[in-house]
Amino acid sequence: MSSTAVDRSSLPVSSLPQRPAGRRGRPWLTLVAVAFGLFMVGLDGSVVSIANPEIGRDLNASTADLQWVTNSYLLALAATLILGGKLGDRFGRRTYYLVGVAGFTASSVAIGLVGNIEGVIAFRALQGFFGALLMPNTLGLLRAAFPPKKFGMAVGIWAMVSSVSTALGPIVGGLLVEHVNWESVFYINAPIGVVALVFSGLVLPQSKNSTGHHRFDLPGVVLLALGLLGVVFGVVKGETWGWTSAGTLGTIGAGLVLLLVFGRYETRVAHPLLPMRLFRNPALTIGAVITAVNFFVLLGVIFFVMLYLQNVRGFTPVEAGVRTLPLSLASVVASPIGAALTERFSARLAMPLGMVLQAAASFWMLAWDAHSPYAVMWPPFVALGLGVGMVMAASSDAIVGNAPVRDAGVAGGLQATSLQVGGALGTSVLVSLISGKVGSTLTGELTAAGVPDTVATGFEKAKDAVAMGVSPVSPDMPAQLRAAVVEGSGNAFMNGVHAAVLTTGVLCVLGAVLAAIGVRRVPEAPDRH
């Protein structure tokens, strides 16, 4: 029988105390320690999009190169998150958390120093790998350190730290890019990483699942990594290749087949990378699905909201970041509220409530147009932030809290993988929806705004720019024509936004129904090892 206890004496597991004395008795210091690493990863995730235009100009990078600055990180992260959690469970969560922090910090500095776009892409992939060692073990350490009655609140604070770091990203990134340089967006991880390493080295307890001399599941690692790579790569390239193209369907299909083979294989191996028994718990399974939906909505909406604020409304990155602060602040407030509701009533209340709030935010955005005052913008930001924070706390608790402590790192990896895959789907699918709607309505909107029919038809080639919120105008255009093109392009872009938020709203309603019906409250049980 396995145990998560630090004590390696020869006593049988049943005779070991559930909560050994020593450093494991300091769970709140554990929470503070993992918060440093989590903050660094969250901040990095949201500042890079602000830095991309400057990276492109400074390194003469193409649009495809800049996509790989994001995608190389995302692919490396998604493919190895569950592996990172498993390594922590098997060999020591503290060890792999510290390796993740050190590697993430070093690769961040290397990105700023390398001086060419190929190096930036390569070190971003390395950064993603170290992030995969770091992220799941934050939840694994909390699961091992906190008793069940306190774990929900710990996850709420964990979610709040993640929300704060993500919220600060656009503002911090905008200030650094405007007043220092794009490299400073990555250098800022150095002091945070050093503090994280020193503090964590002093206070973090070691915890792992002792498994003797069992063989490590290398075939499972390969199958899962290749399957996730196939699915995520197909998703991120779907908008470029076309969602119905042979390349997109073939890549995603191959990834799904490999994941099915992985699932089948894991039921036949004695010590699997991802124990399929975890999915027998409905709350854990639904928590993983709702986590994916949550970040599908959050990252997809943030992507087009930033396009709207900067390209349609003309705000600077910092101004756009300030205007989205209600979303970020609401998610900070909602995380501990979601944790408290989950602790008292189970995830069956908090997850559906959060999904309903996000649905309301999505449907409210149907009232936006190209000239909406801020008074119409901030209420859905607040509703979306409240919903995201509640769901993040409740779904994380549903996944990690319902897994045995011996599988805490793997469960953390599952939660983080669901998050990353959902976010990749959200950005790619919603961008594709916006692009399709812009393509079908651009000519009509231009003529309705006063552009002559023959001229409007000529702007069809500019639909990709309009789908990014950019009006295809030039300085030599007559003022009246320029104004009409700006008006028509803005309206076409908003048609795409309305299609996107209608999709997210319906998805959130379905998620609320799934969580309300599928999650059942179970009587409290002692911590499972």
Image (spheres, rainbow, N blue to C red):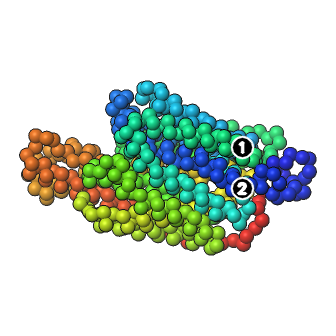
Residue 148's disc is none
Q: Residue furthest front?
A: 179
Residue 361's x, y, as percent?
40, 66
Residue 343 visible (yes or no): yes
Nearer to us of marks 1 and 2 is 1
Residue 275's x, y, as percent?
70, 51
Image position of 314 with respect to 495: above or below: above
Foreground pick, 195 / 406: 195
Residue 27's disc is 2
Q: Earlier in the sequence, mark 1 or mark 2?
A: 2
Residue 142's x, y, as percent?
68, 54
Q: CA distance from mark 1 to mark 2?
A: 13 Å
Secondary structure beneath label 2: helix
Q: Quadrant of the C terminus?
A: bottom right
| Amino acid under disc 1 | Leu
Q: Residue furthest right?
A: 11
Q: State the residue at coordinates (47%, 31%).
A: 112
Q: State the residue at coordinates (38%, 67%).
A: 379
Foreground pick, 388 / 102: 102
Is 376 on the left-hand or right-hand side of 221? left
| Amino acid under disc 2 | Pro
Foreground pick, 58 / 472: 58
Residue 89 visible (yes or no): no
Q: How many marks?
A: 2
Q: Residue furthest top?
A: 115
Secondary structure beneath label 1: helix
Residue 313's x, y, as percent?
26, 53
Q: State the residue at coordinates (46%, 60%).
A: 329
Q: State the residue at coordinates (51%, 51%).
A: 165
Q: How many residues crowd mark 1 within 10 Å: few (<14), some (14–19), many (20+)?
A: few
Q: Are marks 1 and 2 in contact (CB under 8 Å)?
A: no
Residue to which mark 1 is pinned: 202
